[in-house]
Amino acid sequence: MRPNPWFYWLVRNTFRIALRIYNRCSVNWIEELDPDDRMIVACNHASNLDPVVIGAFFPRRLRYFAKEELFRSWFLGSAIRALGAVPVSRADNASAAGALKGFMKLYREGSDVLIFPEGGRSLDGQLQPLEGGVALIAMRERAPILPTYIRGSFDAMPPGLHFIRPAKITVTFGRPLRFPPEVYGSRDGRTVIMEELTAAMRSLESSAP
């Protein structure tokens, strides 16, 4: 089900203004986004604040799955649901597999998709090893991947903290990764995609302001 567009607009712009003021949030684009090019947005994950930050500043409506615990908070659950989140149980492999298939369908129908390829929040704020679900989606849908890095969300709201601190947050959207058909269709395609994505994410981690 699509979020109500007016509520989405209200939530997105409310958070955009609040993050600009309270967290001095800045956004950097290494390459201008093609308005006709749908993306899998692959972002690091160090805070429950991350989907709100990306949802507020990505120029189009994103769809993504989030762990069901986040929806227990009325405020956060309502916000991320408005920004396109779908709850999924991390303990339920069948549910996770269903979410991957569901987002392939959403991408095919015209949605940009957000995924946190580390598979969970970083406990120290550093980028963790990436899991391969993002490559599976890219291969099935022949989709470009947009590496994205958030700096500062861990300081603003680390795991275990239930309020947002006024730490500065920076979002950097990298260059989209596009692969030739032979990579998408090859047996080693998943490895190739994950190696390039990992390198891109590491580069953003080291160079992001």
Image: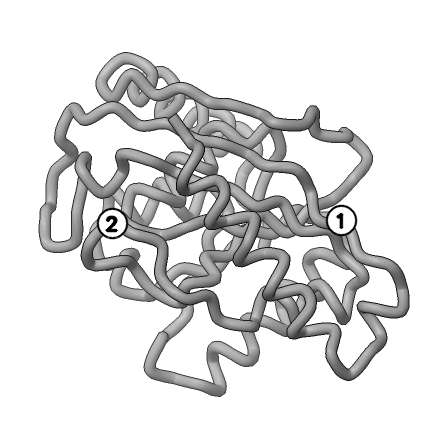
Tag in front: 1 or 2: 2
Above or below residue 95? Residue 86 is above
Q: Which residue is drawn at 36% across and 52% down?
A: 45
- Give left or right: position of 81 versus 113: left
Q: Is mark 1 on a helix, strand or loop?
A: loop
Crowd rating for badge 2 (residues with CA inside 10 Å; few <14, some 14–19, many 20+): some
- Give left or right: position of 39 versus 117: right
Q: Residue at x 71, y 63 (%)?
A: 138
Q: Is mark 2 on a helix, strand or loop?
A: loop
Cα separation between marks 1 and 2: 32 Å
Percent from the top left, x then y, of residue 130? Answer: 46, 66
Q: Which residue is drawn at 59% across and 71% down?
A: 100
Q: Quadrant of the C terminus?
A: top left
Which residue in the structure is indicated by mark 2?
Answer: 125
Percent from the top left, x then y, of residue 52? Answer: 37, 39
Q: Residue furthest top?
A: 21
Judging depth in this view, the residue of 20 and 78 nearest the camera is: 20
The kind of residue tagged 2 is Gly
The kind of residue tagged 1 is Gly
